Amino acid sequence: MEISKEIKQTKFKNEYQKMLINILFTSSWLSSKHNCNLKPFGISSQQFNILRILRGQYPKPVTVNLLIDRMLDKNSNASRLVEKLRIKKLVDRAICLEDRRAVNVIITQKGLDLLQVLDKKDSTFLNELKNISVKEATKINTLLDKLRD
């Protein structure tokens, strides 16, 4: 549905303002759908992001600083998120032997198993986005990348 109908606003200052509002609205819409998929598993989208980063590095442990660098939401408190995941036994933490000020984090088997289940949910979610063609998705990706340059 067109953004002006979604938010019941017909006038915008210009196309740039309309684009900004459209991106923010769509981001919120996507986040909401994503969070609904994660809620039954008791994890947030930021925790999911950390688990995916850790799976990508597995079996190598990583520092919290690496997680911060790679996270989608740069405003997240990675240390707090890691602690919540540790309490759920989805990750393990250990003092880094090379740098005692750093903490190494590694995903547990329980975390890997959870991601395997979530991959199936994610696949279903991605199928819902297929009202956009691959060519259109590529164009959107190009434009979003250009916007951040």
Image (cartoon, rainbow, N blue to C red):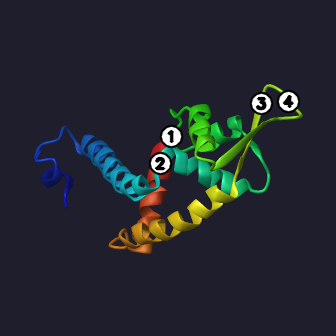
Q: Is residue 95 above or below residue 25?
A: above
Spatial CA span between label 2 and label 4: 29 Å
Disc ID at residue 87: none
Name the one closer to the observer, 92 or 8: 92
Q: Which residue is mark 1?
A: 73
Along the line of sight, which residue is nearer the eye, 119 or 133? 119
SS for dot 2: helix
Query: Residue type at mark 2?
Result: Ser
Name the side, left or right, on which 139 lies relative to 47. left
The percent coordinates of residue 132 (x first, y second) are 35, 70
Quarter of the rendering containing residue 24: top left
Q: Position of residue 115 (x, y in %)?
A: 57, 61
Q: Which residue is mark 2?
A: 45
Residue that protrudes farthest toward the top in the picture: 101
What is the crowding at mark 3: few (fewer than 14 residues within 10 Å), some, or many (at least 20)? Answer: some
The residue at 61%/36% (across/down) is 83
Image spot of residue 126 (x, y percent): 43, 68
Per the image, the residue denoted by label 3 is 102
Q: Is residue 117 above or below residue 61?
A: below
Q: Position of residue 125 (x, y in %)?
A: 40, 67
Q: Helix or strand or loop: what does disc 3 sit on?
A: loop
The CA distance from mark 4 to mark 1 is: 26 Å
Q: Three-letter amino acid code at disc 1?
A: Asp
Judged by depth in the image, the label closer to the viewer, 1 or 2, is 2
Q: Earlier in the sequence, mark 2 or mark 4?
A: 2
> Are the residues tagged 1 and 2 within 8 Å (C-beta)?
yes
Which one is in front in this view, the residue at disc 4 or the one at disc 1? 4
Q: Amino acid at mark 3?
A: Ala
Q: Which residue is mark 4?
A: 99
- Camera-side residue of 25 and 61: 61
Foreground mark, 3 or 1, reads 3
For residue 4, side relative to residue 53 (left or right): left
